[in-house]
Image: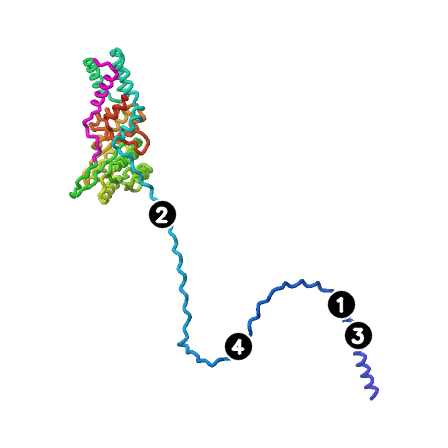
Amino acid sequence: METVILAVVIAVVVLGAISGLVVSGRKKKQLPPSPPAAPKPSVTAPPAEPQVGEEAETPRDEERRTIEEVTLPTAEAPAAEAPVAEPEAPAAPAVEVPEPTAGRLVRLRARLSRSQNTLGKGLLTLLSREHLDEETWEEIEDTLLTADVGVAPTQELVERLRERVKVLGTRTPEGLRALLREELLTLIGTDADRSVHTANGIGNGGDEIPGVVLVVGVNGTGKTTTTGKLARVLVADGKSVVLGAADTFRAAAADQLQTWGERVGARTVRGPEGGDPASIAFDAVKEGIAESADVVLIDTAGRLHTKTGLMDELGKVKRVVEKHGPVGEVLLVLDATTGQNGLVQARVFAEVVDITGVVLTKLDGTAKGGIIVAVQRELGVPVKLVGLGEGADDLAPFEPEAFVDALID
């Protein structure tokens, strides 16, 4: 028995020794050295949040409020937003003050005389010859015909000049100049009423309405531009104007007329491109009545493809406008550079509407000033305005005396 116990003890001791050796062997194996730790940045840590109970005060004996006594904090009113600035509207174009019309033709006299030297100076040179034989008189006649005076007026003028030179026997330059001036004035006429009739009329309802002026003519003669310049003439004379853009068949005609109107503060009544011209003319007069304007200027279409179409169109415009009241003036715009072709146009328009006056444009660019005489003879109406350049104020009331003086200056 004792032997068994002893054997067990020895086995236990042996196992313990073996376990100690194994453990000590493992301890002898060293791990590889770890890399040195990077130095930690010195950061000041924020103070630790107080934990529950650390700073608790000793409870005081106070009366507790009921839930009805507790009020919510008042919400602060939101800060008022700054008003958003609206974009500025584009500035209206400055309204121009047109040049006064009184004496305007005199101020443009130099421009006129330069273009008409062939007529005036040519006649004076011929009349100053020592011997006025038949050949000289034929040259005088050719000079007048070249200036588009017309056959009948030319013959009349030559006959009177021959008679007066023979009877009076005047041969001095001053005498010849005075003689020629007198005869040219007789030929052009000084007694005609050359004012543009813009007086207020009496409407069909018995009320006063603005003066109505229709501007007619072939496209290309400067009709729309002349209408705009005429508005400046009337504004310069102290009248208020409404423009009617009834030329709806030509691209940009309404824009062009509106630009002219804006420059002098005149309103333009317009419609869609290709719209009814008579309707626009009617609305323009209606607007003129509403604004108590002095004058309504209506720019009409200038197509001349057929006389029938033109007659129907212009006739309708005039009839519709006359539902408001009478038309005071119908002005025909002619290009002076077209010469005798302008007379053909004049005849057609005269058959369509009752022309009351003529506006001759581009008179500064031609030596055919005699067209004034021919047109007046053809239509039986006076030339009332002449265009002497491209400037805004180059449309002038026609003054026979200033015109003749420019011819022979």
Identify residue for label 1.
Answer: 30
Residue 255: image x %, image y %? 32, 39
The quadrant holding residue 42 is bottom right
Closer to the eye: label 4 or 3 = 4
Q: Residue at x 23, y 45 (%)?
A: 290
Locate the N terminus and report the quarter of the image it occupies: bottom right
Q: Disc 4 marks which amino acid?
A: Ala
- Judge the density around disc 4: few (<14), some (14-19), many (≥20) Cα neighbours within 10 Å: few
Residue closer to the observer: 319 or 182: 182
- Evaluate if marks 3 and 1 touch, with contact meaning CB atoms under 8 Å apart: no
* Residue stretch rendered in magenta on the structure: 169-197
Upstream in the sequence, badge 4 or badge 2? 4
Q: Are marks 4 and 3 in contact (CB under 8 Å)?
A: no
Identify the image quadrant of residue 306: top left
As drawn, is 319 to the left or to the right of 116? left
Tell us which disc is closer to us: 4 or 1. Answer: 4
Crowdedness near tag 1: few (<14), some (14–19) or many (≥20) residues, C-alpha within 10 Å = few
**Does the magenta-highlighted stretch encompass residue 192?**
yes
**What's the CA distance linking mark 4 and mark 3?**
59 Å
Mark 3, residue position: 21
Mark 2 — residue? 89
Helix, strand or loop at label 1? It is loop
